[in-house]
Amino acid sequence: MVVGDASLDIDTLVIGAGPGGYVAAIRAAQLGQKVLIVDKSELGGVCLNRGCIPSKALISAAHQYENALHADFFGVSVGDVKVDFTKTQEFKESVVKKMTGGVSALLKGNKVEIFNGECMFISQNEARVFNDHESPRYRFKNCIIATGSRPIELKPFPFGGRILSSTEALNLPEVPKSMIVIGGGYIGAELGQMYSKFGTKVTIIEGLDTVLPGFDKDMTSLVAKNMKKTNIEIVTGAKAESAEQTDKDVTVKFSVNGESKEVTAEYLLVTVGRRPNTDGELGLDLIEVELDERGFVKVDHQGRTNHKHIFAIGDIVAGPALAHKASYEGKVAAEAIAGMPSVVDYKCIPAVVFTDPECASVGYSEQQAKDKGHKVKTGKFSYAANGRAVSLNGAEGFVKIVADDETGLVLGAQIVGIEASNLIAELGLAIEMGATLEDIALTIHAHPTLGELVAEAAEVVLGHPIHTMAPRR
């Protein structure tokens, strides 16, 4: 306990216990630092409690339900298939509990001190942490800020009642009959498609000309086609204007090419991006940490702010709001504090969306590679030519590899299809280690597996595929 108003001394203060903060804390402790981690919410942050993990649990349940409904394709007859959404939510919560419990055990096992409460800077080397029971002060040598982000709230669509953020959408007590989704990015696409598989009539309103605008159109077209199969109406090029809710439903007014339209549903889910948690009572302004015009903390190649002993990682710095990006940056920051020459290198950060089919990419797209001055060659291999994919009734999709035409170095890859989220890892490793197309093609992949898709795609680029016709050059 702190006597009077004296401060306790620690090596590293970590603010935020999400996938950036808790990873940074563990790595710092492994490197011999005395670490305190502070979070006012649950360990694991948004990702484990209100984002990545609970959404994937519900998406998995939706896949199981859909598979049971259509098992006759395999000659399997299933009786009266029903959804007990209360049990589905209980399953989701059990997954969250296991994962957050694991984080707690890892922090304690690495002798990281945990404080459940809020944090406020007093100076550039001192902070007060507080909750309802205590408010000790800590003097730190280094600090890693990992306070994450929150859903953007639009003025015409304030959260509350039947207007939901992703947090509320993950905790509905029952499957709604209908839902409107504003924003067809990865959160809106994932949650909209998940509920549609459970039977919800979903309308997605997207301002751009396609859902999942960060991915190639030949990938997103497959997702859009599957969405329409599960009763999703996609309205692109639309501008959402206002919402009016009652105790039973909500009506959204929007326009397309100047034509006014409206749609009514039980709920409205707004997923138009996330805002960095750099405002509030943390006191970044007090210690004069520099922010950009969008509220992101300015950092260097090691995550250092304008104060060399204060670091920032994850959703509060520029770049995609991805859990694995935050974890990676957390390790770099902890190692930089320990004097190691670690720096961030974003060329191999994969992007994955758990739609049906899944989409994944890593490295450069074909156009990005050209924009960087590469003379590129590309090749696609279809899931339809892969025995394992066909046996899984998953013949939709492809693996595309982008390579340098002169050296054969793998520059990027895009995958759409079942297990794309797992298959992308091999191509990320290929880019990281400077592998060539021949390195992948000469690696013996087990048969019959989905992994063969990667090797076959490399052979397509090389011009000598076995299980498809060679492309004309």
Image (spheres, rainbow, N blue to C red):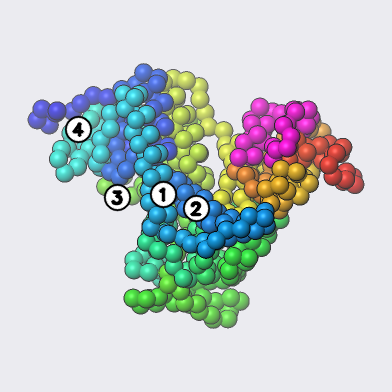
Does 28 appear in magenta? no
- Residue 346 position in % (x across, y down): 57, 37
Q: Are marks 4 and 3 in contact (CB under 8 Å)?
A: no
- Residue 229 position in % (x across, y down): 63, 65
Q: Residues within 10 Å of mark 2 (few under 14, many from 20)?
A: many
Is residue 433 something one can see in this rendering?
A: yes
Mark 4 or mark 3: name the one nearer the start of the chain: 4
Give, as a three-letter code, the residue at label 2.
Ala
Q: Secondary structure at mark 1?
A: helix
Q: CA distance from mark 3 to mark 1?
A: 34 Å
What residue is pinned by disc 1?
Answer: 91
* Label annotation for residue 61: 2
Q: CA distance from mark 1 to mark 4?
A: 40 Å
Give, as a three-letter code, the residue at label 1.
Phe
Residue stretch in magenta = 422-451
Q: Residues within 10 Å of mark 4 (few under 14, many from 20)?
A: many
